Every structure is written in structure tokens, then in C-alpha cells.
Image (cartoon, rainbow, N blue to C red):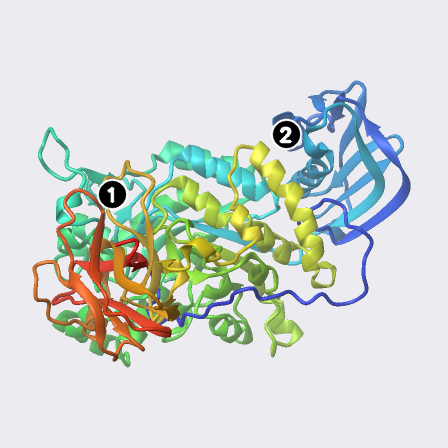
Amino acid sequence: MRALSFLPLLIAGAVFAPSGAAVAAPLPLTPYPAVVRLDPGSLSVPAATGISTPRGDAPAAADARWLAAESARIGGPVLHPGPTHTAIAFVRGKDPSLGEEGYRLDITAHGAIIEAAGDAGLFHGAATLLQLLTPEDGSTGPVHLPLLHIEDKPRFAWRGLMLDSARHMQSVGFIEALIDQMARYKLNVFHWHLTDDQGWRIPIDGYPRLTTVGAWRVEAGLPHRLDIDRKTGKPRLYGGFYGKAEIRRVVAYARARGIEVVPEIEMPGHASAAILAYPDLGLRPVDPATIGDWGVFPNLYAPNDHSLGFLETVLTQVMDLFPGRYIHIGGDEAVKDVWKASPEVQAKIKALGLKDEDALQSWFINRIGRFLATHGRRLIGWDEILQGGLPDGAAVMSWHGIAGAVEAAKMGHDAVLTPGLPFYFDNAVSPAVGEPPSRGLVIPLSSVYAYDPAPVGLDAAALGHILGVQANLWTEHMRLETRVEHLAFPRAIALAELGWTPQAQRRWPDFLDRLRPAMRRDEAMGLKPAESALDPRPTPVADAHAHARDSHQLALCTNRVSLNLEAPGPVAVEARATHLADIMNPCWLWKDADLSGVTGVRLTAGLMPFNVQIGADAARIPLSPALTPNGEFEVRLGGCAGPVIAGGPMPDTGADPEAHASAALAPSAGRHDLCILFTRPKLDPWWALGSINLTTGAQR
Ligand code: ACM
């Protein structure tokens, strides 16, 4: 969980307004190419055919092998890289106007020709052809391609997807599959979030404890639900790290697909794992018991030569592993309390003649920026690096809306747009019951697609500093790789199109038509995109269940930090109920409930650890005295200030993550708003409502 100040807004069902004239039925291509000219007739590609590439052109030969392998996976034509019987040819063009990523695709009666000057362009051309070669509905045999001329290049240079491998870690195999999927849709930046409070995932020579200590934590959970290792009697640790050889493999894998990997090493905050491993990097010890928490920790690197020297050593090795232009240094959510309280830091601020801690952060980031620049690299950081002044040449990744990007672009700095709405894909894709855990807002596919990445109020020069767009997969709530997939796709396909396709070519209804075959193809590749993204509506209340509601079918009393959480349990248990709750105020509203004939209430609730670092904000969470050891539930009439009409003690949950409770309810006819909440004398643990049933005499 990030960004407690992030204002929750439900953008349910935002609709993309089509503009301009209607276009002919689009080709099944996503992202849609910049220029398409359809000619009469078609080319029949036989069930088996050759692909030719220029002699000695290793990247083109690799693209041909990729195209052949992908075609085989989707049951398309059998393609043989080689010079004979070719229907498909890769050609190196010289035209610089299409840039490194642009390409031409010509399909004539004689064959298909992909032409590009750049390696990335040749690859993108192959990805476009693969989409055309996709057989319809499992048919086999020859594929008929329309005769056409495509001239294509991206609208934006940066079309990124960020994966957080610190909160939960993914296998290299999964990451390669994610990169494959990005490549199919011409996404070209894989931003890899490798360090955070909860885990350090990259080995650094000379600092073994980063991975022997900093890469491991106790899985989030209640004390009695931790995954205990029978051999040691201690909680099993969660974590791991990527070997240097694995990292090089991922970088090469991405590069072969036109994708740059941008590593992120967080500083000066989100540093708990490093400081736990090497306490002298910080200013106060990190409590290992908190390291499995989410939220914003107060642990910052000490802004001295020792810690900066450490970070420069880390970055030297990072630059060796990641040859791309950009190095991301985080910079976000550095709560300065520890710096404020430290006489050493205060003396440093004075000695440097700086105004305050923000200026010190700027000094810190500037030093790192200069260090990267001397090595020919560019610093990019979250928009907080604007505080106190940006280093020369630094690029800004704007996540608090786009204000940071606008400010940076006006000052002549490059910026990437990744506003929380609609690009924090750790929010739900649909409000339906049964969606996987996530943050509690719903960001439907339509609102991703509706986003136009051209900030208003920027002149042409400043607009030129908008590098592009990115969506972020923070993984606090994605402990399984299938959940990353579900929350990433198909929304990342919409992202790809708004980063690639000219705004005037984008139309929501067309996109939906093109998306369906794309999702079928992704499934044939073994991926599980979220089908629910195509119909993101709340689960309707069936007549037979008029007296039952899941938490997702109730309103939350407030929407400060709403999350869709599963109750804790052993890591191996995949299927658990989810609970929609505002962790800053766990309270639910059943509006207009029909109480006629109702004589009782039954509910289920999950016992949740309060495992979020929120500093002083914890004081804003309402608590109320409990009469029994586990607290009580309350159902209040007419709203949360109304009288309690039913309530009772919550039981011990034992091994079961869900508790069941019930109580009688004094009859009161008609329809009323009900407020459901729980007494709770302290923050940890707390109850999250799962479902509630109003029972009639016959049922009780
Ligand atoms: C962020 O979400 N803290 C970049």
C-alpha cells in the first residue's frame, strides 16, 4: 500500500468519447498502427512457409525465430526461418523518418515484407504480422491476410510497465512471460522495482547481508496464522533475490524484444531492508518485526558519505547489470522525521547552508544524479524529487496526478506520466464479488483507455518533454503471479495503445472489438487476462439472495484507504475470501435494506492484522471499547449514529480465517439504512466484514 494521501475516487464506467468520423471495420491489430491503407484482395499464407532475413543480420534472424515460435504457439502457420519458399521477408530499411521503433509492413499478392531501420522497429513489425497471422477461432490451414500497407511508429518513446518484485517476488520465468506479453503489444520499458522496505532483491558484491538478511521477511499475518516451519518451530521466511546471471538473462531477453529494463533502487526512503541488513546505513535501528508490514516506513538512509558511498557502490554494480540509459532511484515517500530528529543531520544541513530537510533530499539526489551522469546514465525518480530542486538532466515520473510532470516539463525536464488514476493497476479491475485482492478502488479498462496523455496547458516545447506513459504493478496485494497477470491484463493492452497509437486513431468501441481476439490469443499463449475487465459491474443481488450481501455489495462508510483484502493464512493456501474495507475506518453501509419479517442477522468476518505503517495517521482510526475478548459486531439502524438493533460477541477464529457470528434482531418493518461495524479497543487485529445475511423466522 502506498500513498495514503492519494484521494480515492471511483471511476466506474468512465466512457471514452469517440471523436471524429467513423472508420471502416478495423483490422485486429492492437495497438492500432499510425497509418493503414487497405488494398483489394488477399494473400494466402500456406500452412507452412519460409521467412527470409538479410544475410548476416542476427537481430532480424532472431525476430524471424521469435515469429515462428509465437505462430506455433497460437496454432498459426508453421514458419521456417530460411531462404526458400518464403512468403515473409524481413528487410533493413534506410529511411530514418520512422525512427528506431518504426516499421513498414507491406502485404501484397507476392508476400509480406517487414521493413525497418532499427532493431526495435523490425521486432514491432513482426509483432504486428503475428497478430494478422492469428487464426480465427482455432481454425487451421492457410491464413488469408488482407493486402495492405502499414506505416507505423509510436506516439511516445516511453511505454512502460512497472513490476514491484520487492513486496512480493516473482520467478524469472514469470518475468520473462510478462516481458513477452509486453513485447506483443509494443510496450518498451520494463521498470523493475528491486528494493523496498520489505525486501532487497539484487545481490551486491561486498554487501552479502543485503541478500542474506535484507531479502527475507516474515509473511504478513496474525501471530497464530504465520506459516510455521515444523523443523525449526519458527515462522517460515518469505523472500529471495535474483542472481546476477538471472538479471543479465532478463535484460537480454527484454532487449531482444525491443524492451529496456529500468532498474529501481529506492533512496533515501523505502530503505528498511537495507538498513536492517547494515544498520550503520541508517540513523536508528529497524525493528525486524515490522519488516513484513506495508505502508510508509520512517527509515531513511543517513545523508552522509558512508551511506552515499554505499549507494554509489550499489549503483556501479547496477549499471554493470543494466546497460540502459535510465536508472530509477525512487525518491518517493521519504518521511523526514528521522532526519529532523538527528543532530548529525541537522548539523549537515547547517554546514551545507541548506534551508531544510527537503533541500537536503535535493542535495542527496543531486549527488546521485551527478554520479550517474559521470557514468553516462540518466537519473529518473518519482515526483518527490522535485522537492527542493531537480538535478540537471533528471527525469520525473509523475504519480501524484500529473502536476509533477507538468512542472518538470515546463522547466525543460523530461517526464513520464503514471498518475495513480488510472495507472495504479494494483487497484481492482472490476467491482464484482470474487475479484482477487487489490487496493479498493476500481479502475475499469474504459478509464485506462479514455486517458489522453497530452497534458493541457503545455506548449509544444514542453509537450516534447513528455516521454510517455506507464502503469504500475505494486504487489502488496499480489502474492501470486496469477494475480499480477489478472490485474495487468488486459488493462496494459489499453495502456500500450494510448502510448503508441495517435489520439485521433483511438476509438473505444473499435478497441473492444480488437481486444477480444487479442485476449483469445493471449489465452492460447497460456496467459489468464481478466475476463471481468470486459464487464466491470457489481455482482447483482439475485432475488433469492435479497437478504444477503457480500462486503463488495455494500457501501463503505468512508473511502480513505480502501482495500480488498484476504484474511491471512499459510502462503500455500490460494483461495480465501476477500473483504472490501476502509482500513482507516472499517464500517459498512447497507442502504435501503428491507427489514420486513427479518428477525435475525448472520455475518462472516475475517480477522485481519493491522500491518500498515502509517505513522501519526494511526491516531485517526476510530476505536471503541469491547466487552468481550474478540470484540463485538454491531448493526445500527438508520446510519452509524443510530441505535444498535443487533449485535453480539465475535468468536475465536482458531485456524479458520473466517469467523461466523449471529444475533436476533427486534422486528422493524420497512426499508432502512443499516450500518455495520465492530468494537475494537486497539488497532491490531481488526475485523473485516465478509458477508451479511438478514434472516427471517423460517431461516433462524
Ligand atoms: C509511489 O507510489 N510511492 C511511487
Task: Tell me what residue is drawn at x 70 percent, y 59 percent.
Answer: 506
Q: Residue at x 55, y 59 (%)?
A: 469
User: Which of the four quarters of the rendered structure image does ligand 1 lie in?
Assistant: bottom left
Say the numbered circle drawn on residue 393.
Answer: none
Q: Is residue 353 left or right of residue 366?
A: left
* Residue 695, quarter of picture: bottom left
Of the two numbered discs 2 and 1 in the rendering, the one whose residue sits closer to the viewer: 2
| Residue sitting farthest toward the right | 40
Q: Residue furthest top?
A: 84
Q: Quadrant for residue 647, please give it.
A: bottom left
Residue 408 location in percent, x, y? Answer: 50, 72
Q: Say what amino acid the circle numbered 2 marks.
A: Ile
- Helix, strand or loop at disc 2? loop
Residue 410, above or below 37? below
What's the residue type where badge 1 is placed? Ala
**Residue located beneath label 2 in the image:** 74
- Crowdedness near tag 2: few (<14), some (14–19) or many (≥20) residues, C-alpha within 10 Å: many
Residue drawn at (62%, 36%), measured in percent from left and top? 521
- Left or right, 570 with respect to 21, comes to left
Q: Position of residue 115 (x, y in %)?
A: 76, 39
Res 365 seen here: yes
Q: Is mark 2 within 8 Å of ligand 1?
A: no
Quadrant position of the C terminus in the picture: bottom left
Residue 425 appears in the picture as rendered: no
Where does the N terminus fall, quadrant-wise? Answer: bottom left
The residue where tag 1 is placed is 215
* Mark 2–mark 1 distance (CA, rounded to whole Å): 38 Å
Residue name at image x 32 percent, y 58 percent: 693
Q: Name the side, left or right, on which 469 lies relative to 584.
A: right
Estimate the x, y position of residue 45 in percent, counting from the top left: 80, 27
